[in-house]
Image (cartoon, rainbow, N blue to C red):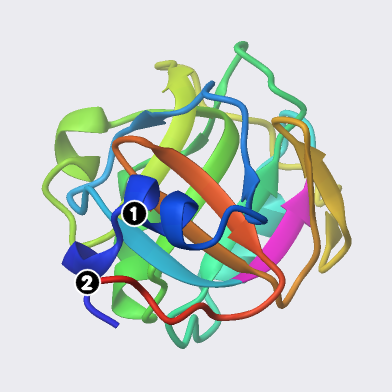
Amino acid sequence: MSPSSVVTPDICDAYPEVAVVDPIFANFGGLDAFAGPIRTVKCFEDNSMVKQAVAEPGDGAVLVVDAGGSYRCAMLGDMLAEQAVANGWAGIVMHGCVRDVDVLASLNLGIQALGSHPRKSEKRGEGQRDISVNIGGVIMTPGQWLYADNNGILMADHQLELPG
């Protein structure tokens, strides 16, 4: 699937049953549109599990990180984002903040987050992986499909045939 084929308004029109995530995210990555099956991390002001996840093969998946909506530190920066690109991740949705935004904008990776923050996170090895998370009013479960562009983020229970 080509990232440019993801147009969330068209997907909503074709599939009214898709879940629409609350409009709280902004685009920080070099790709304006991305999609893929999700994998999840739940952590708070400790990005150890994010680092672990992006070090693994992404195989076109989207990493959804429930960072508790914290605005006190960044949970993703240039080094982890570059590793995500190298390992084949399609995108990252960060329910928290990112940093190194100029570098993030140059990468072949979709990244949506709540905002940017210059401070790095703690590294205590805390968090959970591959669990359901509730972000923006939508319960997201590993294996569901996420579709994102500058219009918003959608969740579907399976891969959709995109309109177009």
Q: Position of residue 164 (x, y in %)?
A: 22, 72
> Left or right: 56 with respect to 86?
right
Closer to the camera in the image, 95 or 152: 152
Q: Can the viewer see residue 79?
A: no
Q: Quadrant of residue 129?
A: bottom right
Q: Amino acid at mark 1?
A: Asp
Q: Quadrant of the N terminus?
A: bottom left
Q: Within the magenta stretch, is there residue 52?
A: no
Q: Within the magenta stretch, is there residue 39?
A: yes
The residue positioned 22% from the left and 68% from the top of the image is 5
The residue positioned 44% from the left and 19% from the top of the image is 115
The residue positioned 29% from the left and 37% from the top of the image is 150
Which element carries disc 1, helix, strand or loop? Answer: helix
Q: Amino acid at mark 2?
A: Gly
Magenta-tinted stretch: 38-42
Sequence order check, earlier mark of 1 and 2: 1
The residue positioned 39% from the left and 80% from the top of the image is 87
Q: Position of residue 97 (x, y in %)?
A: 51, 26
Tag 1–tag 2 contact (CB < 8 Å): yes
Residue 79 higher or lower than 1, as above or below: above
> Left or right: 82 with respect to 118?
left
Q: Which residue is mark 2?
A: 164
Which element carries disc 2, helix, strand or loop? Answer: loop
Residue 122 higher or lower than 111, as above or below: above
Q: Which residue is mark 1?
A: 10
- Label 2 Cα neighbours within 10 Å, binned few <14 / some 14-19 / many ≥20: few
